Amino acid sequence: MKTLAELNAIRDRARAQMGALRDGGENNTRLVVGMATCGIAAGARPVLAACLEEVQRRGLSNRVTVTQTGCIGVCRLEPIVEVFVPGEEKVTYVNMTPEKVSQVVAEHIVNGRVKMEYTIGANQ
Amino acid sequence: MKELSLHILDIAENSLAAGASLVEISLTEEAGALTVTVRDNGRGIPPDILPAVADPFTTTRTTRPVGLGLPFWKMAAEQTGGRFSIESAVGVGTCVTAVFVSGHIDTPPIGDMPGTLVTLVQGHPRVDFLYTHRAGGVDFTLDTRTLRDTLEDVPLDSPDVLAWLSDFLRENLRI
Ligand SMILES: Nc1ncnc2c1ncn2[C@@H]1O[C@H](COP(=O)(O)OP(=O)(O)OP(=O)(O)O)[C@@H](O)[C@H]1O
Ligand code: FES
Ligand SMILES: [Mg+2]
């Protein structure tokens, strides 16, 4: 059973990881999930959870940051995840699901190959 | 939306957009009703637009605040024979209340409240959230100010802290 008491140990571990972050995460790859009303209705919450889990599970936390934003502007393509790799053009993934997130993290973030079939360009 | 917890996430996002530093969410299940309140200390809604925010289609205003969140929430509550209200004061904050009739066929399940709370904390790690759930005479409370006291300089959105929070809520918030 998780208890509040465990949080002391979590704090010490998280503090050690923060120290390991080069340049405060400034040059991290960013995964941005749209979290406005229609994004939420279309399933953005489990998509965000999948982003957090995949990054944590694959030990990418020190080089990948997950953030949320409001309306990205294309209701019928929600949930939307934008990927910003430093020095590369933004890639917008649409109609995302937790399963697609794990493929995008594996292919795009880890192997550096854009998962073309899930991008906005392939879905318009 | 299929879950009350998704509506709650959406309504709380309004509080965050209004610059709140504290958002209080409470769910109370008693006497055949489920009452959900979302209260914030954000910038508030001016009295001249307040009537229109929940009823964008029944007002004749030309500068109506466009949005789906509040009208959806109101409709969801009223469909069950429950009620909806919004109170707000500029510079003080806003309180949105929705009452659902328990067991009504149109009352959505509460759904994944842990998922909603983790999403809120992850997206707004500097805002405080007070979550209270009362059901069957038992209270569950999560106050991020208490977590912050223990975490000291470690932010609430650190991956390890979020993973712990998710597990903690899932184990302790059995609904
Ligand atoms: N807690 C709040 N504090 C201050 N203003 C609010 C609050 N909740 C709603 N409002 C105002 O009411 C408007 C309508 O809210 P509503 O949730 O219906 O739509 P929205 O947030 O604008 O868009 P959407 O929810 O569809 O993404 C908001 O744009 C905002 O101006
Ligand atoms: S509100 Fe629909 S995409 Fe933004
Ligand atoms: Mg809204």
Image (cartoon, grey):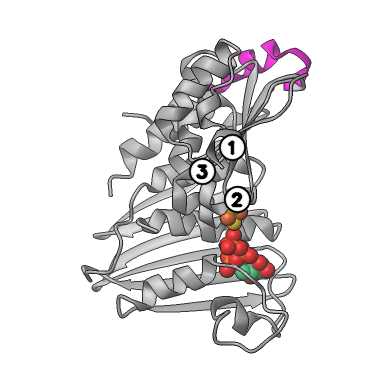
Classify mark 2 as within 8 Å of ligand 2 or not, answering yes or no. Answer: yes
Image marks 1 and 2: residues in contact by CB distance under 8 Å: yes
The span from disc 3 to disc 2 (Cα, nearest Å) is 9 Å
Q: Amino acid at mark 2?
A: Val
Q: Is residue B159 left or right of residue B101?
A: right
Q: Amino acid at mark 3?
A: Pro
Image x and y of residue A26, in percent: 77, 22
Q: Residue at x 48, y 37 (%)?
A: A96
Which residue lies under the disc numbered 2? Answer: A74
Chain at tag 1: A
Sort mark 3 into few (<14), some (14-19) or many (20+) by Cα contacts within 10 Å: many
The span from disc 3 to disc 1 (Cα, nearest Å) is 11 Å
Q: Nearer the viewer, residue B75 or A82?
A: A82
Q: Amino acid at mark 1?
A: Ile
N-terminal-most mark, 3 or 2 = 2
Which residue lies under the disc numbered 3? Answer: A79
Secondary element at image label 2: loop
Which residue lies under the disc numbered 1? Answer: A120
Q: Residue at x 51, y 63 (%)?
A: B38
- Write the start and end of the magenta stretch as one range: A7-25
- Circles 1 and 2 on the same chain: yes
Chain at tag 2: A
Image x and y of residue A88, in percent: 74, 21
Q: Residue at x 70, y 14 (%)?
A: A21
The answer to whether residue A46 is above or below residue A40 is: above
N-terminal-most mark, 3 or 1 = 3
